[in-house]
Image: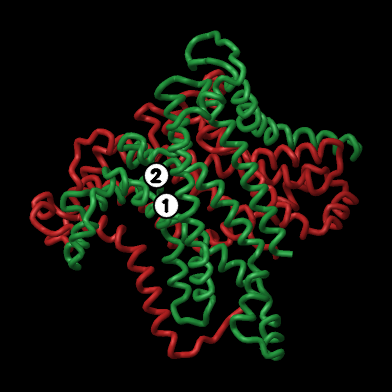
Amino acid sequence: MKHNYQTRSLPLLYLLFAFITAIVLFPILINVFTAFKSPGDLMNSSPLALPKVWSFDNLKSAFEKGNMLIGFKNTGILVLVSVILNTILGAMTAYVLNRFDFRFKKVIMGMFIVAMVVPFYTTEVARFQIIKSFGLYDSLGAPLLIYAGTDLLQIFIFLQFIEKISSQLDESAMIDGASYISIFTRILFPLLLPASATLGIIKAVDIMNDMYIPYLYMPSKELHTLSTSLMSFVGQRASSFEQLSAAILIVLIPTLLLYLFLQRYVFSGITAGAVKE
Amino acid sequence: MSYSLQKKLVIVSFLFIPVSLLLLFLLYPSLRLLQFSLTDWNGISKSFHYVGLENYIAAFKNPDVWKALTNNFLYFGIHAIFIPLEVMIAVFLNNKMRASNFFRSIVFMPYILNGVAVAYLFSFLYNPINGPINSLLESIGLESWIQNWLSDKGVVNYSLIVVSLWRFSGLHVILFLAGLQSIPNDLYEAATIDGAGPLKKFVHITLPGISRVMEIVLFLNVRGALQVFDIPFLMTQGGPGLASTTFTVYTIQTAFKYNNYGLASSLAIILMLMIIVFSYFQGKLFKGKGD
């Protein structure tokens, strides 16, 4: 719906949204200012003031001291591999659940629904032991296997898309002698790619921003992600506020860029499960 | 290969990995939690004893657990108070306002940012000595509002809830906006022809139109508020004392810091039950009102 508000209430609306914009941007801008200030500048001026001279020194030393390169590398690997695995597994699950009838279908759906109420974080108390017994502790394998698993929301969105693809397409391929596997890989999976892009971006953001799973399962320095690099950088307490701000800024940048360029997908991913088409 | 044989093979092979992952890393751990919750296991030793419901009784008698739960409830309550405001902002964003796309991007931005970075960013903002927030208050003549945001027991929770609001309110607004956009325009046109005013339209068209989204937001709020973890974990470790601890922070510390896996597991099971019960009753309450 689109409403036309009377023009006299418009300035008030702009004022409200200017206020909201200020609340959102204030913390980020202060952090940017601080990240570019020299130590002396920070000491002697108001924390709200612009830097007198914009210096990249803090960013450089935070990047090195904080092991950010390792963080970028590990986060990159985790995002790439998990998103690919997760997309393929999610699409496969949705394909089977939508196109075939079989005995345990309801049981399997039920299990995915039950998994929705399993709490985050506290479940690690038991999952920790399982990961350890598989010998996956302190390796990239632990988060990879946890992230790769598909969830109800993802299956639900894939199902919405698959339902719209006519099963006549499958049938005509079967007349040509195509196997079920080639129907999935050659016909259905390509048609699911738009949905996969949307879901993949949401998953990527979740993984980039996750901290507890890498923190718990990958304590080694060489395995730090962006989030845990920042955590250990702060934990050392060896650095000043301007360096801390610089490290925060470095960690904020990847998702910020992703948001700037792929906003459309982010929005459709976030709202896809909430609104019926 | 015949299609019926193929079908069986495809079903089994396609579902094998996803279902195994689900069983291994989500459902089996939940069962293990249930088992641990009945023991005195410390997480290290090879053996443990079954102690019946002792951990559950200890959890209920533990004033710290109740303190943590009160904090969770504060998150729930304050986020709930903001829901009408979020609906209002979504309605405004749905206007023919110039730059509404820009404002939409701004409103949602905090949700997408790295939570660790945001938590530390706010720790810096709240810094009591020459911190940006106190400086801001000073510069606009509100010196009397200056606080020790993270070390004052009476203030710390509200400081953390502000971070939570900053991060998650935008998500709710965007969900409500999507709900509003799914309402067909002709409903409003028909109502205008019938002479309905803006308030009537809001009550009879807009509110029912976003009821599904409302249900989702309420569910997210229950689940989120009961499981608040990273903000207090990163910013205060639940302190000072237990002033800003939450149920999840307390559980995690009980397990990994104090090695009391039995008690921690019983807390995890209690949390799971609370999520189920609260979601169920909230859903029921909501359905009853909606119909």
From what the image shows, is residue A140 above or below residue A175?
A: above
Name which residue type carries label 1. Ser
Q: Are marks 2 and 1 on the same chain?
A: yes
Q: Chain of mark 1?
A: B
The chain displayed green equals B
Where disc 2 sits, the SS reads helix
In the rendered image, the quadrant that contains the N terminus of chain A is bottom right
Q: Is residue B173 visible?
A: yes
Q: Is residue B174 left or right of residue A116?
A: left
Of residues A262 and B195, the one nearer the viewer is: B195
Q: Which residue is mark 1?
A: B164
Q: Horizontal and vertical percent for residue B194?
A: 71, 89
Q: Is residue A194 visible?
A: no
Q: Residues within 10 Å of mark 2 (few under 14, many from 20)?
A: many
From what the image shows, is residue B216 above or below residue B24?
A: below
Q: Residues within 10 Å of mark 1 (few under 14, many from 20)?
A: many
Q: Which residue is mark 2?
A: B231
Where disc 1 sits, the SS reads helix
Residue at x-position 19% and y-position 40%? A239
Q: Horizontal and vertical percent for residue A144?
A: 53, 34
